[in-house]
Amino acid sequence: MLKVSDLKVSYGPIHAVKGISFSLEEGEIVSILGANGAGKTSTLFGLMGIVKSRGLVELKGESLKRKNSTEPTTKGMVLCPENRRIFPELNVEENLRLGTFVRGNFAENVQSVYELFPILRERSRQLAGSLSGGEQQMLAVGRALVASPEVLLLDEPSLGLAPVIVDEMFRVLKGLREKMSVLLVEQNATKALSISDRAYVMQNGSIVHSGNADAMLNDDSLRKAYLGM
Amino acid sequence: MSELLQAITIGIPQGALYGLMGFGIAMIFRSAGTLNFSHGYSAMVSVLITLSAMQTFIGLNLLDGRSALFAAIPVGLIAGAVFGVLIDLLLMRRVKHVSPASMLMITLGLLLVFEGAANLIWSPDYESFPRLLPGSPFIFEGIGLFEGIRVVFRRNDIAVMLIALVISVSMAALMKYTKIGLAIRARGQDPVGAQSVGINTNRVDSIVWGLSITLAVVVGILIAPITRVHPTMLMNTQLLGITAAVLGGFSSLFGAIWGGLMIGVLERLIDIVPALDGYETAIIFFLIILILVFKPNGLFAGKVGRKA
Amino acid sequence: MKRILLLGSGILTAGVIAFLLTGGTYTLGNLSLVLVWAIAGMGMVIIIGNTGQLSLGHAAFMAIGAYSTATFTELIPGVYGGMLLGTLVGLLIATVFALLIGLPALRLRGYYLAIATIAFGVGMEQAIRAMPFPNPVYNIPHILSFTRSGPIRDVATFVLMTVLFLLFYAIGLVILKSPFGVKFRMIRDSQVAARSYGTNLAANKLQAFIVSAIFCALAGSMYAVTQGVIQPVTFGLMAAIDLLLIIIIGGAILLEGGLIGAFIIVGLPALVLEELVPPGSLTLIYGILLIIFVIALPSGIATELYVIWNRKLQAPYMAGLRFLHRLKPVKGNLAETLEGKQMHYVEQGEGPVLLYIHGNTGSHQWFREVMVVPGYRTVAIDLMNFGRSDRIETTDNIDIYADHVAAFIDQLGIGSCYVAGHSFGGAVAISLAIRYPQKVRRMLLIDSAPIDGLPLGDDSEARIEALRRHYGVLKSAIGKVMGSRSKDRRLHSLLTKEALLMKREAYFNHALALSEFDYRESAAEFNTPTLVIRGSLDPLISDDQARRTADALGAELRIFENISHALIIEDPEAFKRLVVNFDMNEGK
């Protein structure tokens, strides 16, 4: 589904991502784990063309130019960014409508998003900035889903949420597997591994470990070394 | 009483123009992230182009006076749009990621470029510009209870108000109901969020620049009969437009239009007090400092704070 | 001080050149105007370049200065009373306005401050327009109105403006170098850091704002009394942009940027361009220049020149100095040491030989004031790779240097001598005395490199590289080890130039050699009578290190109070007394 070879992202003299390669198969949930500053978000931004990157990114066998985010999004790869990044002065429905800016049928898809997150239906006329943190995160995920992505890039969906809401969020994410492939970036490694098929561990811009999610969950030394668990 | 009403009737159309100017300035500020000090100057050059086009049409005997004016207006509007897009493509895109101060200084540079070009290609002289709606003014005389009240409406002012109203309404509709309008607002509120839904923010910026300067050209064409056409014709309008945007708090685009109306009326009202005659612009500018300091989000700041 | 003199002579030279080129004094009038704007430009350098507050309203302070001066000269007849009072009142009003505007506006950041200040600037212009001044204000008496207008007045005005500019330049320099300046830059570089450092942000910003306002107000006053005519538009929006242009093009960090910028923005049009280009196009040119500078050369000319000077021109500059210095004749002799290499030395007097070995970046010149020691024949050498001695391949081995000294002693047929080693030379002396005990009768170590090595600091490589590449850095480093004698400019300059003669590849290797140097074990059998001395203020060698050296060599340690790293130049008489009266003759 998604194949990445030798992806590099630099900000001036700082090399945030130093040539990493990984893949995501159809119907898979794959996690990228690692500490703050490991280069996870830069990887996603590089894939989406939000920052300049070098290397080969193939979506469904087709190479992406990544000059801007429009191209990857149109072709089915959609990002749900870190820190929600919703539009605070637009209402919930307008936020979701913008989710279909380049792909997806709004009228159709918005219903399934409302089913997934019923609270958003209730608040559809409310300004997004007035929602609670958890609701904003649901809106952010909903805004990505409404585009009916084939590959969903999720950046820290559990960041700053109450534990109950984190559980709810992961329950929803687990269910996405039937409809799309998911690349999940998370600091909450245990949670992420529990719903993933495979995982990569990043450190200082490089992938230092990869493997089966269950095996990684049981690998004590790995968990201590990289994941701080 | 007459004076007061007259001040308001003259102030409102004037203020509507400041408001439209401020609307464009606020739009660029919100979306493209810079305060455009060349706003009125690029529009001024476009007005000069309009004037030249009109004179050419007349000179070549293609059209007569009024139809030449209406044929020339689109030329000026297109010129403004082209200036806007070019400024973004050629200059702003290079420094967008460097620093906000660089963008601001480039707009100051552009101010000089436009003024210099106007002096060089055209001339520093004042040239007259035809009104959209010529003719004698309407005069209202009060009767009965309002005996003795006399208010004069200039015809051109009515055109100005109508056009300002139409533009405001269509801008509101554009922002609210069209995809591009939503994209412009989204880009201003959260650039990364906008890119996440596939909005090409660079393209949005170009559109914003083009649109804003086109609006400024409209203002320029409407105000030209009063100021006449010369290189600094829009200097004060631009400064008052910035002021209007400040009153509106930059955060809401339409705040700028309300802000503009207030300034327009205030300017006329200060004028009534003899002791303050001549000081109106100075007073307004000093007021701005106070507003910036005490109401930095503008006079009409909503309750929704801007969250991260 | 040096910068001020340099700049002053530069300006005067420019004046003379301008005079010679045009053959008239008219140009000097233009240059005076440049200096006036340069004073305002320096104000902008302080507030924008150094404090990071983007103010676009400073032209208004010029207006305040100008109109105040004009008003008072009108009110108070007589030549100078009104002018002086007006200027002072102008400064006062500017200060008050800077307070009034700065107090609230400086709470704003970035664009908002820019808007507030431009509103102030334009508001002030409009207010002045509305006030009952005649427009324009004519016939403001000239600052030198006791002279008749003409060439003499032009020249005198130019000189006066130069003096005034230099005065404000000096004031600016003092402010920027003072703790205030440090805090200003802290505000610019990071508001968070400044706050955590306990800096009172608001107060410091306001200080910078007021200082810059005063610079601008004075420039305004001087504009009025040199130009004779002012009008509101002189200090309007365009003036505000001109001020910005001056520091963008000149450079916003260094005060010199104000002068360079003013010359380009105000001077060139009047001097040259006006005749070359069609009218009106100047604005266009400056607009394009501004854009180009912001995109391509954002730090401005002064800063770029500074960078070029420090990065690119130091090597040729130092090479030139080295070449010139080598040409100077020295009354020394050459003696062959090893492998046909020649060692350079000077000598004086009759008696037992006292051999002087200098330190790193040193030469025989370090001993020039202790050559006359009654009863001794003093011999000061240039070590190999130093001074006027030959270059040898090895630079990182103290023993090789010592071998050459040993060969030198043989060559001169001295047999055995007294050896005094300073700093790096101390290490050479230790190596010599331990490995050639028969050649060293007694040893004196002056702030010597420690016997157990002088460790390299964390960033020594970079620092040593800076010494090698930058004359100013080298000079200040040598000044530091000269202690109180660094005030002696001629000596300081001489010793720095002597340092240039050292082999360039050796800078880092000498430090490396000293760090690896360790003669503690070899010193076990050592029994040459030795005295170790150290200046109490020595920044390089610690008391502990000197003590360890003395202990390892079984020597006495003597401390000299109020002396830094170099007794031989700081107090030569004390050194000579030490040599004559004490241990050297008595033994231990």
Image (cartoon, coloured by chain):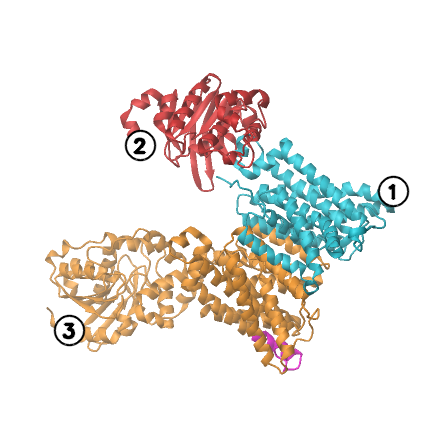
Chain colours: A red, B cyan, C orange
Q: Circle 2 — which element?
A: loop
| Residue A227 x %, y % | 33, 30
Magenta highlight range: C142-160
- For marks 3 and 2, give the CA distance: 68 Å
Which residue is the site of mark 3?
C582
Q: Which mark is residue B63?
A: 1
Asked whether residue C157 is drawn in magenta, I would say yes
Name the image quarter holding residue C27. Answer: bottom right
Q: Nearer the viewer, residue C323 or A81?
A: A81
Chain for mark 3?
A: C
Q: Amino acid at mark 2?
A: Gly
**Residue A56 higher or lower than C117, as above or below:** above
Q: Amino acid at mark 3?
A: Phe
Q: Residues within 10 Å of mark 3 (few under 14, many from 20)?
A: few
Name the image quarter holding residue B69. Answer: top right
Residue B215 makes an appearance in the image: yes
Q: Nearer the viewer, residue A222 or A187?
A: A187
- For marks 1 and 2, give the CA distance: 79 Å
Q: Which mark is residue A228?
A: 2
Name the image quarter holding residue A70. Answer: top right
Q: Circle 3 — which element?
A: loop
Q: Nearer the viewer, mark 3 or mark 2?
A: 2
Chain for mark 2?
A: A
Residue furthest out toward the top: A178
Q: Amino acid at mark 1?
A: Leu
**Residue B178 higher or lower than C184, as above or below:** above
Q: Are marks 3 and 2 on the same chain?
A: no
Q: Circle 1 — which element?
A: loop
| Residue A120 x %, y % | 51, 27
